[in-house]
Amino acid sequence: MRAVIQRVSRATCTVDGKITGEIGTGLLILLGVADDDTNDDLEWLAQKIVNMRIFGDENGLMNKALTDVNGNILLISQFTLFAQTKKGNRPSFIRAARPDKAIPMYEQMITTLQKLLNKTIATGIFAADMKVELLNDGPVTIVMDTKDKENH
């Protein structure tokens, strides 16, 4: 799994002119699922997202996690995070999971994050033409790939 995590003051997802998800302070997460991702990848990434200390404390240092600031999440499915661009000018998405795998993994990530945070997660709509608007705070943007995780 790959995630682009952006600390935001606000973020909104709109589909066909209707808001599907909206948050204030929190994280906008673009999530891509690879064909070889497992539940272990999902659990590891969810824990990292919830516990990552990227919000400012009283001294302006990044020492607080999402739960410390009562932040929210807007989770957007994003298969294009697996674009391969080495050959030619048209990206290949062969590593991205097909919908029969990606949809259940995306839905499981929503459920897992909701359980960890004990609150509802705002979302887009899988495979829809989404318009995502955000006010990046910092800016703070972190890219994570579960294939890069260290096991200790």
Image: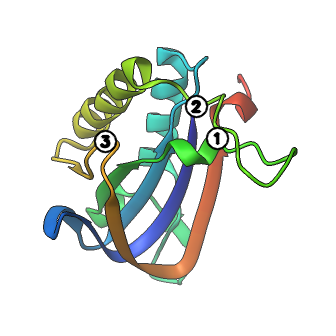
What distance separates the C-alpha of mark 1 from that of mark 3? Answer: 16 Å
- Of 95 and 25, the residue lying toward us: 95
Tag of residue 82: 1
> What percent of the width, then of the height, locates residue 103?
34, 27
Up the image or down, 1 lies above or below 31; here it is: above
Q: Are marks 2 and 1 in contact (CB under 8 Å)?
A: yes
Q: Which residue is mark 3?
A: 126
Q: Amino acid at mark 1?
A: Phe
Secondary structure of residue under mark 1: helix
Q: Residue at x 44, y 54 (%)?
A: 29
Question: To which quarter of the image does residue 35 belong?
Answer: top right
User: In this orientation, does residue 61 appear?
Assistant: no
Q: Quadrant of the N terminus?
A: top right
Q: Amino acid at mark 3?
A: Phe
Q: Residues within 10 Å of mark 2 (few under 14, many from 20)?
A: many
Left or right: 22 in relation to 96: left
Up the image or down, 78 lies above or below 11; here it is: above
Q: Residue at x 18, y 64 (%)?
A: 16
What distance separates the C-alpha of mark 2 from that of mark 3? Answer: 14 Å
Secondary structure of residue under mark 2: loop
> What percent of the width, then of the height, locates residue 98?
48, 24
Tag of residue 26: none
Q: Which residue is mark 2?
A: 96
> What percent of the width, then of the height, locates residue 121?
22, 48
Q: Residue at x 53, y 29 (%)?
A: 44
Up the image or down, 49 lies above or below 150; here it is: below
Left or right: 80 in relation to 150: left
